[in-house]
Structure formats: C-alpha cells, structure tokens
Amino acid sequence: MSSSADPLSLKKSIDPIRDRILFRKETIAIAESVTSGLLQLAFSMAADAEKFYQGGITAYNIGQKVRHLNIEPIHAMSSNCVSLKVAVEMAIEVSKTFNSDWGIGITGYASPVPESENKLFAYFAIAYKRKIVVAKNIKPKKSNPFSIQLFYAHEVLDEFHTYLNSVE
C-alpha cells in the first residue's frame, strides 16, 4: 500500500483489519513512539472501534516508556529506546495494560539524529495473547518526518493485515 501524505489514508488500511478482529471477537491496543499516535488515530476512525479497539499510549521518551510500559531501563538507555527488544516489550506490555488480545508496539526514528547515526529506521512488534507473532525492522526512503511516520504506520498495518489473513 502506498503511504499517502494524508493521515486519513490510514482509514482504508483499517477496515479489513477491523473486519478480521471483529469476526474473531478480539481486541487490540497500541503503544507508539515514532508514529506519535497515528496508529491510534487509524484504529479510532474504524466503524465500531469501541467493539475491538481498547486504546493506546504514545510514550515518546525513555522515561515514559519505562514508567508506563515497563521497558527494561538498562537496555533502553543503551539503545536510546530504539530496538527490536523495546518494540517487543511495548507490544506485550500494552496488551497487558489494556487487557487486549493483540498489542502493537513501534519505536524508531523519523528524522535524522546523532543517536541513530543520522539513519532512519523503526522496529515494530505485534503480540497475540502476550506472545510475539511478528517483529520487524522498517527502513524508509528519505523524506520529511511526517511522511516517514505515515509510511511506518502503513507498513505496520499492512504487516498486521497480512498476518491476520494467514491465521484462522
């Protein structure tokens, strides 16, 4: 799917995910950093969101990720809170916090900073019943930070949709 510069483009990605989650009678919660709430926005726009979307949290810095998502602090400090391990912890903890079947966690960089050696990348994880079912790295093409955030959100939604379609 292409990531349009319009955040409403995320809504089209949500409908088939909503249908699968409702069919399965399950729920989802989201923990975000790099996407700053775009995934939460997308899920909240779905028809009948209240029937499957439990909510989410945007924890942008190390202190908030440790406090609200129980991210392991020593690793968090060593990685600037951007690693696959952190994304995994975010996905599992948000599903615990919101008592949901599914949890998604994402962390990364949408603009070049010295901590990332000026590279752009993100890690995301999808948990089901507190077990990780998808965990990946995303590398965008260079663009403006908002377009990169939308790209990340679309990639996560696409991966989630693909995974949902692969399981009964």
Image (cartoon, rainbow, N blue to C red):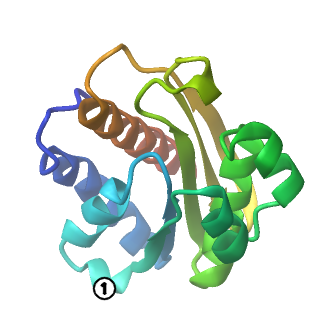
Q: Is residue 53 left or right of residue 32?
A: left
Residue 168: in sight, yes or no? no
Q: Which residue is mark 1?
A: 50
Query: Alpha-carbon neighbours of circle 1 within 10 Å: few (<14), some, or many (≥20)?
Result: few
Residue shown at 29%/39% (left/top)? 150
Q: Quadrant of residue 147?
A: top left
- Residue visible at 50% across and 71% down? 29
Residue 99 lies left or right of residue 32; in this view the side is right
Above or below, 60 against 143 in this view is: below
Residue 48 seen in the current view: yes
Q: Residue at x 76, y 60 (%)?
A: 131
Which image quadrant is residue 80 in?
A: top right
How many numbered dots are placed on residues in this image?
A: 1
- The extreme front residue here reads 114
Amino acid type at circle 1 is Glu
Element assignment for label 1: helix
Relative vertical location of residue 11 with respect to residue 34 in this rendering, above or below: below
Say which quadrant the C terminus sits in: bottom right
Residue 36 position in % (x across, y down) = 38, 55
On screen, 159 above or below 114?
below
Q: Quadrant of the N terminus?
A: top left
Q: Which of these two is toward me, 118 or 154?
A: 118
Residue 117 versus residue 146: which sits nearer the camera?
A: 117
